[in-house]
Image (cartoon, rainbow, N blue to C red):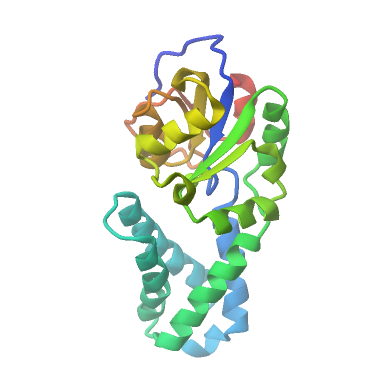
Amino acid sequence: MMDELSTGKKYKCVFFDLDHTLWDYETNCRETLYDLYSAYQLDKRNIPDGQSLYEQFKKVNTTLWDLYDRQLITQDVIRKERFKQVLDHFGAYEETLSNQLSDDYLEACPKKPNLMPYAEDVLHYLSKKYQLTIITNGFEKIQHVKLASGKISSYFKHIITSQKAGHRKPSPHIFEYAVHAHNIQCCDAIMIGDNLLTDIQGARGCTIDTVFYNPERIPHQSKTTYEIGCLSELLNIL
Ligand SMILES: [Mg+2]
């Protein structure tokens, strides 16, 4: 459900989420798991193919990240649990294998370069009109590697991770941290992200306008200033 639009509103800063919004988490994750499937010869471990590995990982990972976003588990639990649960599903769990896959995944995945459609064009366009900043829940080192892999680091004035800010989305404190970093008011910024809880509800909690990026057109009842299915639609809004 979209708010009543305030036409002609001028923003000074555009805040972006990173994973699933600019950096194509799904594609990068799938490619990494296909690589791991071959490297570890997982066909010999009762896992039929790379796609099955990816689909099971996606299921487990989404559930764990959702628990993390609701502050029910720590990031450490995600790291320890996800390959254990995936291997368990195929009856292929071994502690050493699980730990090796987890380490290799964390090392390799952020180095994948795929971005969401039109991400670079949109950043190029917006960077001429606004100051751009990333607000992301994640580890400083890993998120910087992803931005470098996607060759988009130079578009951003600030890269604010939850690790750096000491708070994570949807906490208003991480958005306040970003607003202070730019020396602006909340009404001068707009937040673009794919997650209704962390990005949209979080920014609204700080009275920052929002763009819900919803490429799969998931039905929802949340309030957002704008909603788009493709990043290229930002050119009509901003
Ligand atoms: Mg995201």
Q: In terms of depth relative to the viewer, which is nearer, 209 or 218?
A: 209
Q: Which residue is drawn at 71% across and 41% down?
A: 154
Residue 85 visible somewhere in the drawing:
yes
Horizontal and vertical percent for residue 135? 51, 41
Which residue corresponds to the image point at 37% horizontal and 85% vertical from the top-left?
91
Residue 219 visible in this rendered orientation of the protein: no
Give 220 or 109, whichever is nearer the viewer: 109
**Residue 233 location, x and y as percent?**
60, 28
Locate the N terminus by quadrant: top left
Q: In which quarter of the image is the C terminus?
A: top right
Number of marks:
0
- Report the side of 162 relative to 183 (left or right): left
In the rendered image, the residue lying farthest to the bottom is 44
**Measured from the top left, where is residue 143 in percent x and y?**
57, 53
Q: Which residue is drawn at 57% across and 78% down?
A: 37
Compared across the picture, whether 171 is left or right of 132 comes to: left
Q: Which residue is found at the position 39% from the left and 85% from the top? A: 93
- Name the residue furthest left: 72
The image quadrant of residue 159 is: top right
**101 to 237, vertically: above or below:** below
Residue 54 placed where, x, y %? Answer: 50, 67
